[in-house]
Image (cartoon, rainbow, N blue to C red):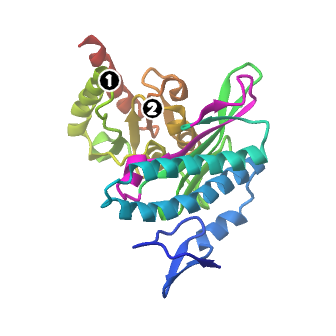
Amino acid sequence: MMMPVLPRRCFSGTAGWRIESSRVCFFLRPERQRIMALRLSPHMTVMQNAAQRAAKRLLRDFNEVEQLQVSVKGPSDFVSQADLRSEQSIRDDLTKARPGYALLMEESGASGGDNWTWRWVVDPLDGTTNFLHGIPHWAISIGLERRLPDGNTELAAAVVYSPAVDEMFWAEKGAGAFLNERRLRVSARRELHDAVFATGIPFAAVSAPRRLAFARTLGTLMPQVAGIRRFGSAALDLAWVAAGRYDGFWELGLKPWDVAAGLLLVREAGGYAVDPAGGDPLQTGDVVASNGHLHSKLLDIVQDGVAASRTS
């Protein structure tokens, strides 16, 4: 299949790009062939297909954004449009497959009414700043919520797809978490001095109490651990905890679309994901996630940081 030439470089994605002479050819990566061979549920098939289709355009846009770094107008408007196009693509695919489901999306908000039984929770481009700066660490995040007979809700399915490296993290409640075709487990590290944690560093618009809570937590944790990382995508941070790459993650003030899919990934990989008070991060936006051995230690430190910010 003939495709237009992409500028400067090409990243492997859902179906991959390969440069041959002056042409860009479309091909199916072996990893995607194997994951397609797994027996996915109807919901998971819909979610992965939607993520993969949106990823193709995002990869083309990502290659373009580098060219715009040197333009007078700059890349910000271009990236905003890329985000919106991705969301529209995902919305179209999810709505076509499940027309009765509600949606909660980063750009367009909630739709489908309040009395939903099933709801998609979507971040069409998590890690927008990375995307804007040409850093290949960003993702598409799709979570699926189900309302239970008692009125409470639960996360039923999750996809976090990193197109630049073709890593599809996915999970369904009670069925485990996977990276492409490989089953995931959180890390087994027990001691803080061996652990690497991830977080999100507050930026200028973040409230002063939240910045103080972060500073207190970081100041206490940093001398005790092997390292702390800030890569700029909460969805991937949680997916990497599920994969055992990080031993834990904490961040305050996130949105439901940032964390819905990642929370289920961590839990289905055998980890814990709560807010600092032990509640539901999907409701509060505050997340502490880690393996079972380190969870109480990380949670205590984050709780102390939050408490200190409230008394200062």
Q: Quadrant of residue 209?
A: top left
| Span highlighted in magenta in the image | 108-136
Which residue occupies the foreground of this view, 248 or 163?
A: 163
Of helix, strand and loop, which one carries label 2? loop
Q: Residues within 10 Å of mark 2 (few under 14, many from 20)?
A: some
Image quadrant in which the N terminus is located: bottom right
In this rendering, the answer to whether 212 lies above or below 69 is above
- Disc 2 target residue: 254
Q: Earlier in the sequence, mark 2 or mark 1?
A: 1
- Disc 1 target residue: 207
Which residue occupies the foreground of this view, 251 or 136?
A: 136
Q: Quadrant of residue 289?
A: top left
Of helix, strand and loop, which one carries label 1? loop
Q: Amino acid at mark 2?
A: Leu
**Separation of marks 2 and 1 at Cα, in angstroms:** 13 Å
Who's the residue at 30% across and 14% down the image? 310
Image quadrant in which the C terminus is located: top left
Q: Amino acid at mark 1?
A: Ser
Name the residue at the bottom extreme. Answer: 21
